[in-house]
């Protein structure tokens, strides 16, 4: 047993889980390879937030049935949100799978591999920080969710909220920075709830202040936020801490108050708008991205128009829109009827995407001729690419290697999804607040 492959789909939390599991397997002496059929261990890290995601995962798992029969010595594991507390149905459906692991439950696989290799697993489980991370890394800070939105399966699959300690997280971030990471994104299904489950309550702001002190770390981000838990101290931390980027991912999910109520979101259209206005008044150069579900149970044309108006008025930098799909076991599945026709859902998605493209074009055009600070991540098709503090994707050409560095780029052309520019200089920056014009005011 020498190699492994982890197939990952879904959110950034899944990606972070895969990176942590990969670290544990590498510490056992295994190497990651890209060819799933050649790997001794194959792990499917699954997502079920939408039916299409679950179908994709099921198809991948099914594809290994004959391969497992022909290679019984191979180890095949399934993890992620497809795996719940009771896996009887999964075991009957996928008898060729050796292990089923719930989110963040890495020990069964690491223990199984260690036993086969006659190795100690204690150090591997204690330290699951990626050994060779990229310039940017994801760090889960809180697992689970207590919101129980009517459309969402996550609380049933990932459990209730459980925060990791500030000490543990600071240590992990320090290790990542020592290994070359320059930007850390703090993750949670509801990242703003961080620390609320502690006996002596802490907040996301407390964690941001602690991580901001780590030497050689250039940037800090966090996602995803819930409007109800976006507190003044979090906004103040983003406004004042030099390493925390001026960017919020703040889903509104629906524009009509009646739909928000049956979604169990806990806020109104007006409350969301006032929150965004408050954020922008304190952080003028902030960027705000959002999520939206169209075609939720009983959503009328007039109610969809409220969502369309929200996109038009708020001028978000990016909108992730998806048609509603019933998730078995959710409150909506049990109590509501999925009665909006599929063709109507697709048409509503099209209208939102068309509007948001126009909004993004206008937002980004305001950056034309300005100079932005970019953290260079990688080279793609002969061009260096990186992101601004406000999460704008920027491309530029240069013969030098600027990976992991902060550079200044003069923007010469803009599009809806990215910017093009010319390198100006490489500033000597360790940690500071940098602002530049963004069309969210």
Image (cartoon, rainbow, N blue to C red):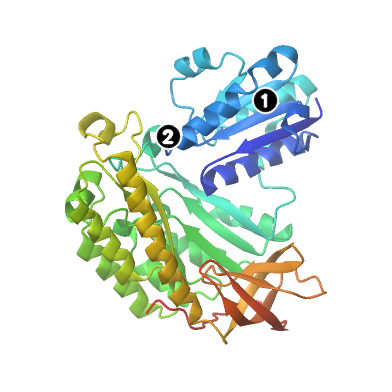
- Residue plotted at (70% across, 53% down): 133
Would you say the residues marked 2 and 1 are in contact, meaning their CB atoms lie under 8 Å apart?
Answer: no
Question: Would residue 366 appear left or right of 334 to someone viewing this image?
Answer: right
Which quadrant of the rendered structure holds the C terminus? Answer: bottom left
Q: Position of residue 209 (x, y in %)?
A: 50, 67
Res 233 label: none
- Residue plotted at (41% across, 71% down): 359
Residue sitting nearer the eye, 232 or 55: 55
Disc 2: CA contacts within 10 A as few (<14), some (14-19) or many (>=20): some
Residue sitting nearer the eye, 96 or 80: 96
Secondary element type, mark 1:
helix
Residue sitting nearer the eye, 163 or 435: 435
Note whether residue 210 is visible: yes
Question: Would residue 124 appear left or right of 256 to someone viewing this image?
Answer: right
Res 51 label: 2
Q: Position of residue 196 (x, y in %)?
A: 36, 51
Question: Would residue 312 appear left or right of 438 to someone viewing this image?
Answer: left
Q: Nearer the viewer, mark 2 or mark 1?
A: 2
Q: CA distance from mark 2 to mark 1?
A: 32 Å
Q: Position of residue 258 (x, y in %)?
A: 17, 51
Task: Give the total of numbered labels.
Answer: 2
- Work out whether mark 2 precedes mark 1 in sequence or the reverse, and give the earlier one: 2
Disc 1: CA contacts within 10 A as few (<14), some (14-19) or many (>=20): some
Q: Position of residue 369 (x, y in %)?
A: 57, 87
Residue under numbered circle 1: 111
């Amino acid at each position: 047993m020498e190699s492994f492959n982890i197939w990952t789909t879904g959110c950034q939390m899944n990606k972070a889980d895969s990176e942590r599991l990969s670290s544990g397997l590498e510490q056992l002496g295994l190497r990651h390879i890209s060819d799933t059929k050649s790997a001794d261990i194959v792990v499917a890290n699954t997502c079920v937030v939408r039916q299409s995601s679950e179908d994709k995962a099921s198809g991948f798992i099914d594809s290994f049935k004959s391969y497992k029969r022909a290679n019984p010595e191979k180890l095949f594991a399934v993890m992620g949100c497809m795996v719940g507390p009771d896996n009887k149905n999964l075991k009957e459906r996928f008898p060729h799978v050796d292990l089923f692991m719930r989110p963040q439950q890495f020990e069964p696989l690491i223990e199984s591999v260690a036993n086969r290799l006659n190795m100690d697993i204690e150090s591997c489980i204690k330290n699951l920080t990626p050994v060779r991370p990229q310039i940017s890394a994801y760090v889960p800070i809180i697992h689970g969710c207590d919101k129980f939105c009517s459309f969402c399966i996550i609380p049933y699959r990932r459990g209730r909220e459980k925060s990791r300690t500030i000490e543990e997280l600071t240590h992990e971030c320090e290790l990542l920075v020592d290994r070359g990471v320059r930007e850390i994104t703090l993750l949670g299904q509801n990242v703003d709830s961080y620390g609320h489950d502690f006996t002596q309550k802490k907040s996301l702001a407390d964690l941001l202040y602690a991580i901001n002190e780590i030497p050689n770390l250039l940037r800090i981000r966090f996602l995803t936020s819930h409007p109800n838990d976006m507190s003044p101290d979090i906004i103040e931390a983003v406004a004042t801490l030099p390493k925390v980027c001026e960017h919020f991912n703040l889903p509104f999910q629906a524009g009509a108050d009646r739909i928000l109520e049956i979604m169990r979101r806990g806020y109104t259209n007006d409350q969301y708008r006032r929150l965004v206005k408050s954020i922008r008044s304190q952080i003028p150069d902030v960027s705000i991205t959002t999520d939206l579900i169209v075609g939720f149970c009983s959503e009328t044309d007039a109610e969809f128009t409220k969502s369309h108006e929200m996109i038009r008025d708020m001028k978000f930098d990016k909108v992730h829109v998806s048609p509603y799909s019933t998730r078995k076991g959710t409150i909506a599945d049990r109590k509501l009827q999925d009665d909006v026709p599929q063709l109507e859902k697709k048409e509503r998605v099209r209208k939102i995407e068309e509007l948001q493209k126009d909004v993004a074009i206008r937002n980004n055009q305001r950056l034309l001729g300005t100079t932005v600070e970019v953290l260079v991540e990688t080279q793609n098709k002969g061009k260096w690419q990186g992101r601004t503090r406000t999460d704008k994707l920027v491309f530029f050409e240069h013969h030098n290697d600027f990976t992991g560095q902060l550079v200044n780029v003069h923007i010469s052309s803009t599009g809806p999804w990215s910017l093009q520019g010319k390198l100006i200089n490489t500033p000597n920056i360790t940690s500071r607040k940098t602002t530049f014009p963004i069309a969210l005011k």
